[in-house]
Image (spheres, rainbow, N blue to C red):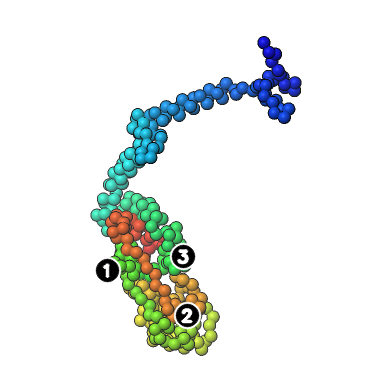
Amino acid sequence: MAEVERDLATGVQTTGHEWDGIKELNNPLPRWWLLVLYACIVYGLGYTIFYPAWPSLTNYTKGILGYNSHADYYTDAADAADAKKQFTDRIAAMSVAEIAGDPQLLEFSLAGGKAVFNENCAQCHGVGGQGQKGYPVLADDNWLWGGQLADIEQTVRHGIRSEDPDARQSQMPRFGADGIIDAAAIGDVADYVVSLSGGEVDAAAKERGATVFAEQCVACHGENAAGNKDLGAPSLTNNIWQFTGDRTAFVAQITSPKHGVMPAWQGRLSDDLVKMVTVYVHSLGGGQ
């Protein structure tokens, strides 16, 4: 019987393997580690037998139990829909004013409306309705088309300058591009608008611009430039701007204005979701 060789430094038996003078020690894995390994192997084999596991080119193994996580999801989703139905049916049958007046439905609508808003509206108006350049802020009480619940619902349902026949429509003339007024007059009225929100401008240009404003702009923006919600014409006095509030931006907008488009959500969203997101948006800015 061959004598067992042991490592001189550790006293551990060697395996007889040696590379460049380095001998391999015979250190077996701990018994507990091997038991865990064997248990995992048995569990894995059992899982592939009882549950879906192995893919094929066209399908997968179904498993003895026939378990399907998609079926669980659809069951859970159906249960959730049934639980919400008591609220959604009432919301669909009520006006937004009635919904806002019912504490239980109001709470449900604010939660559901927030989810709808984050999924469909936040990309333009920002999470929480803080807005961004070119897209109005919904978290204040400054409304282009009115902040009553009915006003907001009309906008949500039919959109602004959308293809919906009942969409809100407004169009600012291209005063410069169409030659309605010349560049000098545009510069003067831009100075006048800057002055309305407290900006410093040339007094003579402001006076000339006031005359141009009275002739060309009062019909939409009003004599006091406070705007007109029936036309979607913004106030020019509160220093709240959809784009920017500097003179260069005013000149560009007067010359060839930008017009945003909001899609109509009626038909894309169910009636109860339209009402819920209306109630949520109304809550962001305090409503009117």
Residue at which label 2 appears? 251
Residue 281 on image: x %, y % = 38, 60
Choose between 287 and 82: the one closer to the eye: 82
Q: Is residue 83 above or below residue 43?
A: below
Q: Residue at x 28, y 59 (%)?
A: 267
Kind of residue indicated by mark 2 = Val
> Element type at marker 2?
helix
Q: Nearer the N terminus, badge 3 or badge 2?
A: 3
Residue 51 on image: x %, y % = 38, 32
Choose between 26 and 278: the one closer to the eye: 26
Rounded to the nearest whole Å, what is the CA distance between mark 1 and mark 2? Answer: 32 Å
Residue 67 on image: x %, y % = 35, 34
Residue at which label 3 appears? 132
Q: Is residue 53 above or below residue 217?
A: above
Choose between 166 and 112: the one closer to the eye: 166
* Number of residue marks: 3
Q: Nearer the N terminus, badge 1 or badge 3?
A: 3
Kind of residue indicated by mark 1 = Pro
Do tag 1 and tag 3 residues touch (Cβ < 8 Å)?
no
